[in-house]
Image (cartoon, grey):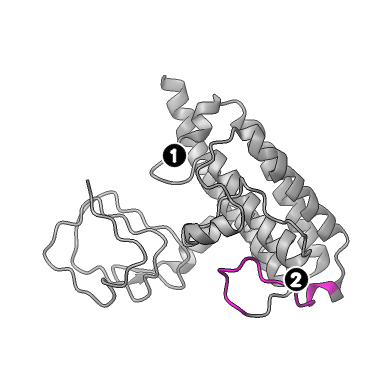
Amino acid sequence: MPAEYTQSDQFRGACIHLSDLSGLEIRDCDVTGLKIVDCYGGNVSIGGGFERVVVNDVDVTAHVEAELDRLHPNRVLAREATSAAEYRAAWDAIEQQWEETLDRARRLPEAKLHEQVDGEWSFVETQRHLLMAGDAWIGNAVLEEDAPYHPLGLPSGWMPAEASARLGLTLDATPTLDEVLAPRLARMTTMRRVVDELTEAELDRVCGRKPADPYPDREYVVRRCLTVVCKEEAEHHRYAVRDLTVLEAGARTE
């Protein structure tokens, strides 16, 4: 079984030379300053949030971002919203795209919606994660609800299991799509109400809470919280439709 390293700093500043790294997977890591030089291979995949990416001395950052924006225009709405009207427009688009994508997903057998493609979250797990994002950034930070976290929420991989337990999350749950969508769509409705009632003054209000205890102690304004939720929705929709295409192809051949 391949070795697994979690929350380790043993590779910081390391040089890996003349080694077989085929099949290596680096996930949820800080790779600032990562250099891959004079290496070779096929089927290399890189994904994440990078400030600058250079491939064979060519800066491809702007090209990649422009292509992603072309393919997924809601990324632009989510990223560039600054006014109350723009947040409403972004959420309108997000609601519409998920309505269409959920209809598409329901045409697959339930079992397919629990399959992971290339080790990524399944469609159901993606809905669980977006539920958690809404609970944390809207229910807890913006609205300061008494019980903001639904137990089916799924946090990012960096959150320690004990922190998730303190939030009341059941990480090993195996809910159906409908069981997840009940709280997920309810939280989306909450977000709908927040943006509909949003004022310019409210955007700069400092929230009384941070999203969750593991998050850094700092000021979180409403504007930042709304942007995080919109960007999470747009990016995870991109992942979801990418993987649905693979699942649909598999379903046709079975």
In the image, residue 51 sits, relative to residue 127, either above or below, namely below
Percent of width and height locating residue 2: 23, 50
Percent of width and height locating residue 39: 19, 62
Instruction: Tell me if 146 is positioned left or right of 232 in this view.
Output: right
Can residue 47 be seen in the rendering of this structure? yes
Alpha-carbon distance for marks 1 and 2? 34 Å
Q: Where is residue 106, by image quadrant? A: top right
Residue at position x 77%, y 51% in the image: 92
Residue at position x 52%, y 36% in the image: 244
In the image, residue 150 sits, relative to residue 63, either above or below, namely above
The crowding category of the residue bearing disc 1, from other C-alpha atoms within 10 Å (few below 14, some 14 to 19, many at least 20), is some
Task: Name the residue at the bottom extreme.
Answer: 218
Q: Where is residue 209, by image quadrant? A: bottom right
User: Disc 2 marks which amino acid?
Assistant: Val
Q: What are the residue bounds of the magenta stretch? A: 202-217
Q: Which residue is mark 2?
A: 222
In the image, residue 24 sits, relative to residue 9, either above or below, namely above
Percent of width and height locating residue 138: 73, 61
Can residue 73 be seen in the rendering of this structure? no
In the image, residue 184 sits, relative to residue 223, either above or below, namely above
User: Disc 1 marks which amino acid?
Assistant: Gln
Q: Disc 1 on helix, strand or loop?
A: loop
